[in-house]
Image (cartoon, rainbow, N blue to C red):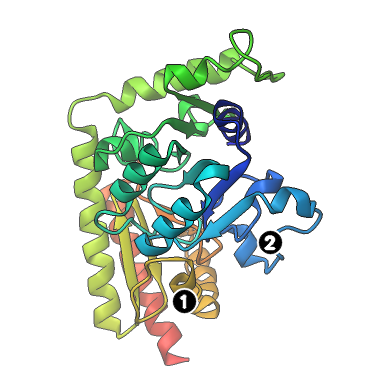
């Protein structure tokens, strides 16, 4: 992400970056403003140790709010290099985009000459083979990927429009290098993984499995009388311990984290491994069997009832 943003700054000749509250794009200085995930869970201030001169170039705005989005971009268009976004937020829990939000973002950035960066570290090759851009029909200018392209091994990559990528050395002035760049083991694992994802019916099967599990989870919560707001996008999902819709960072913070922590520990005691934070998204995997998911639902029902019994 850091390299993609640097590239956007050189390409546009501007320094400003817009991100969204609760979205996490790595621990580079300019991204630790109202970041999600571990920042929320640990209660750490957004940017300790980050120079104010760096932070002042970053504007963080509410996710899914088209009114604030348009005003921010139009008011700051002359100084903005890029907007970076998780097309489906996964670091404040799973928060899908509202209808029209990503299209509005694409239309505005294109009109104002601002580079649109999709952080598809989570959504890339997960929601579809073409990621969130295929699922929602939105084309970003630059896209960032993570471990999926290395079969789970440590690797990252970014790519996009040729006119922007041509700014990278030796064709352009932006320096890019890394000790593990093009690591043969990671690349071989990545190629093998991407071939598996191309198997006929892979994503349809994964969607069917995720749908069935999410419906089962909703039924378990309702049957136990546990207030849970369930958000899902493809195989990404989060059950927020709240009775209100979760559409952005502010509403995500309304979830009962103490109740989640109790649920997490109880599920762990039954060898069901959830994310240790209410704000980490859960994933349904092609490797999970129907029996695995049925057991998870059974243990969820047990945990919910135990929590409510006090």
Name the one closer to the observer, 102 or 291: 102
SS label for mark 2: loop
> Is residue 286 in sight in this rendering?
no
Examine the rendered structure and indicate whether residue 247 appears above or below residue 226. above
Quarter of the image with the N terminus in it: top right
Crowd tier of the residue under label 2, counting other residues whose Cα lies within 10 Å: few below 14, some 14–19, many 20 or above:
some
Image quarter of residue 143: top left
In the depicted structure, whether residue 180 falls above or below residue 155 = above
Q: Position of residue 302 (x, y in %)?
A: 37, 76
For marks 2 and 1 on the same chain, the one whose residue lies earlier in the sequence: 2
Q: Is residue 8 above or below residue 67?
A: above
Residue 11, can we see it?
yes
Mark 1 packing: few (<14 Cα in 10 Å), some, or many (20+)? many
Q: Are marks 2 and 1 in contact (CB under 8 Å)?
A: no
Picture quarter containing residue 228?
A: bottom left
Tell me which residue sits at (30%, 31%) in the image: 129
Left or right, residue 63 beside residue 17: left
On the image, the x and y values in percent for residue 163 come to 46, 18
The Cα atoms of the two marked residues, 2 and 1, are separated by 20 Å
**Mark 2 or mark 1, which is nearer to you?**
2
* 169 horizontally vs 277: left or right: right
Identity of the residue drawn at 72% across and 18% down: 179
Residue in the foreground of this view, choosing between 277 and 114: 114
Q: Residue under circle 1?
A: 255
The residue located at (26%, 52%) in the rendering is 210
SS for callout 1:
loop
Query: Residue tagged by mark 2?
Result: 46
Q: Nearer the viewer, residue 67 or 174?
A: 67
Residue farthest toward the top in the current orientation of the protein: 170
């Amino acid at each position: 992400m850091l390299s993609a943003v640097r590239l956007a700054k050189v390409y546009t000749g501007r320094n400003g970056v817009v991100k969204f509250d609760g979205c996490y794009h790595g621990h580079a200085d300019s991204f630790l403003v109202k970041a999600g995930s571990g920042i929320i869970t640990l209660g750490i201030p957004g940017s300790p140790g980050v120079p104010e001169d760096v932070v002042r170039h970053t504007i963080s705005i509410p996710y899914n709010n088209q009114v604030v989005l348009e005003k921010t971009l139009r008011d700051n268009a002359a100084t903005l290099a890029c907007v970076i976004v998780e097309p489906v937020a996964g670091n404040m829990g799973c928060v899908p985009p509202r209808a029209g939000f990503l299209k509005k973002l694409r239309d505005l950035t294109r009109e104002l000459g601002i580079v649109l960066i999709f952080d598809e570290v989570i959504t890339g090759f997960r929601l579809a083979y073409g990621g969130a851009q295929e699922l929602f029909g939105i084309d970003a200018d630059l896209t960032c990927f993570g471990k999926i392209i290395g079969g789970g091994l440590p690797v990252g990559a970014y790519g996009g429009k040729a006119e922007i990528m041509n700014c990278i050395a030796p064709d352009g002035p932006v320096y890019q290098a890394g000790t593990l760049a093009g690591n043969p083991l990671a690349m071989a694992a990545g190629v093998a993984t991407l071939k598996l994802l191309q198997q006929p019916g892979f994503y349809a099967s994964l969607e069917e499995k995720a749908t069935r599990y999410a419906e089962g989870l909703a039924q378990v919560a309702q049957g136990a009388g546990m207030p849970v707001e369930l958000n899902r996008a493809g195989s990404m999902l989060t059950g927020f311990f709240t009775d209100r819709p979760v559409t952005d960072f502010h509403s995500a913070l309304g979830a009962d984290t103490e109740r989640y922590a109790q649920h997490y520990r109880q599920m762990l005691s039954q060898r069901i491994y959830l994310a240790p934070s209410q704000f980490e998204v859960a994933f349904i995997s092609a490797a999970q069997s129907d029996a695995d998911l049925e057991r998870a639902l059974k243990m969820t029902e047990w945990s919910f009832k135990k929590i409510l019994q006090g």
